[in-house]
Amino acid sequence: MKGKSSRRSIRKKYVIYGFRIFSPLFLFIVLFLFFHSFRAKVSDIKEKSYTSSRSVAVNIQLVQDDIKKLSTFVGVDNDIKKILCSSDVEELNKNSRMWFDEAHFDTLQNLIALNGGIRSFAIYPENGVQPFLRGMDGSVNHPTIAKVRNTKEYSFTMNRQYSMYWCSVPKSTRGTFEVNRQDKIVFYRELFDLKDRKPLCFIAIGLDKSTFENICHGALNSAGESLLVFNADGEELCSVEDVDTDIKLYIQRNILGQFSEDKTTIQFFYDGNYITCTKFESGSSIVCDIVSLTAYRGFFLQQICIYLFALFLILIALYVLLRIMSKYITKPLFNLSSGIKKFAEGDFTQHVEVYDDDEIGDVARAFNKMVSDIDSLINENYVIKMKEKENELASLQSQINPHFLYNTLNSLYWQAIDQNNEALADNIFSLSRLFQLVLSRGKQEILVENEFELIEHYLEVQKMRFNSKLQYSILLDERIRHQKFSKLLLQPFVENSIEHGFSNKTSECNLFISGKYDDGKMIFEIKDSGVGMTQAEINSLFSGEKKVGHDRVGGYAIKNIIDRIHLLYGEEGVVDIGSIPGEGTCVRITVPFDENGTEGEENVKESADS
């Protein structure tokens, strides 16, 4: 197959391969966009359905709460309560205006009038006092508590939690009415004396059913949407727009029982409908928003036609474009271009596959050889540069004759002792120990405690220059004291603080050096109270533009020290520098902790004495 393809012209290969590659890609894009549009529309339907059901549930709950508060007023009003608890029933019943004369019923009537949806109001005292009955729409309630007790509504109310019951009472349906002239949603409640749970009265408040229906109508968002309201027992209170009977039964039998205190919203698909059922709180009514997806069938068909037509146009345009561009661009050339781009981004492992023995194949082979040669040159140059840095350090150390230096400093030390100049003797000892630790018998690795000892002696020597103005403290974690550590990684930062941070300061110069163990890493910090640096000066340290102390021990450019840390520890070696001008600088160096890199006692002693 490859041999047959290699005999085709580049133009034909471009058209064939291009069409094979791009046509599935465009098909995938078009399908992705269609399904994304479909999911977005369904998500929008879900969100609107949830919003509608939640809004209706909240508003219906507000209406129901108002009715409950009105019924509660009957039980807490002192005048009404006297009537409900009175034992002189016959005397009260002699007065036909008893409720107005004895209870000053004006307040209750005003509350009823303020709620424009109330169509009937009945209070049936359990002690035999004549009931209070009002029918604003011409409806007539049962005249006695005895008749009410024989109704199923009374029985249902008494058997429910808190003795409260909401139900729908259609026009001409009797229930607790002698005559019912309007569709109502009625709230039944039995009030008790809280002291001994003695029943006081049975209350029936009839609301115009349109009160709930108007709330539902106000929440509808689109065609094909309907709302269904159930009471807490799963009985239908009202519905707007036509709701299929099967859907009602399915919700009543399978969904309403799933609500709990933690689960107040249930969303599901059923028979081509998306349904959201919301229960505002425990014991409240349940609102179900039903959206028929068949109402959106035209929208989805339109979207399918649009995307298929777009795909058709794209494929035609792709074929024409490939025919035109095939004169100048080929698939092998495209691969070569891709390889060059990755090479330009720093990927020196690039290798372009050679398809044919034509001119482009020759170029591809030449490119592969060039990348390989450049990769080799870079690796060699990297190694050479590393060796140059090591030789630079070795060259600096070799400039000092150890034997001459030790003998001279030893003589000076004893001279100072003979002259009782202990301060000078200590400084000479610090200088001697400093050079001894720097040379460390040519070792490139020393212990962390030796590096800290080197820093301490260096600071003692510097105190000769700064006198009492230089104050320092050193803190080293015992867990990292005997870890192997590359020599002269910390001292240059200390020297930089002294030479540049304290050089122009007249006040006290404070320096704090610490080393600690933290989660598999060693963290070193050098903090000074010097003049500080700007962010631009910090950036110059990392870029190598600013160097310090070229002619003294540890006087490599900070950039070289940072490079050494990266070369030795890779990505685990991190250097952070933070500074505030006028306040000071903090250098934080993080390197890995080697669990197997701790030397034994003999090696520790040898390193300390070297």
Image (cartoon, rainbow, N blue to C red):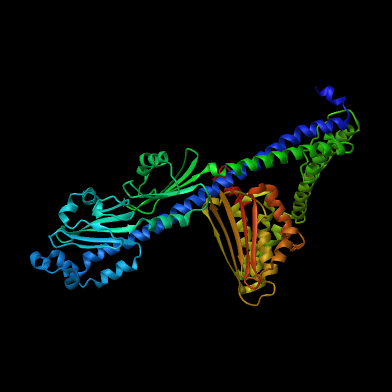
Residue placed at 32% from the left, 49% from the top? 232
**Front residue (pair 213, 564):** 213
370 or 145, nearer to the observer: 145
> Which residue is more in the foreground, 512 or 533?
533
Q: Residue furthest bottom?
A: 506
x and y percent of residue 440 in the render? 67, 51
The number of numbered badges drawn on the structure is 0
| Percent position of residue 578, x then y | 64, 63
Nearer the observer, 6 or 165: 165
**Can you tell which quarter of the image residue 116 is in?**
bottom left
- Quarter of the picture containing the N terminus is top right
In this picture, is 338 found above or below 448? above
375 lies left or right of 597: right
Q: Is residue 372 visible?
A: no
Taking the image as drawn, is residue 400 in sight?
A: yes
Left or right relative to 545: residue 64: left
Residue at far right of view: 359
Tell me if 8 is positioned left or right of 307 in this view.
right
Q: Is residue 358 above or below residue 325?
A: above
Residue 447: where, in percent of width, then height?
61, 50
Q: Residue 363: where, in percent of width, then height? A: 89, 35
Q: Measuring 90% from the left and 30% from the top, which residue is drawn there?
A: 358
> Residue at position x 74%, y 63% from top?
549
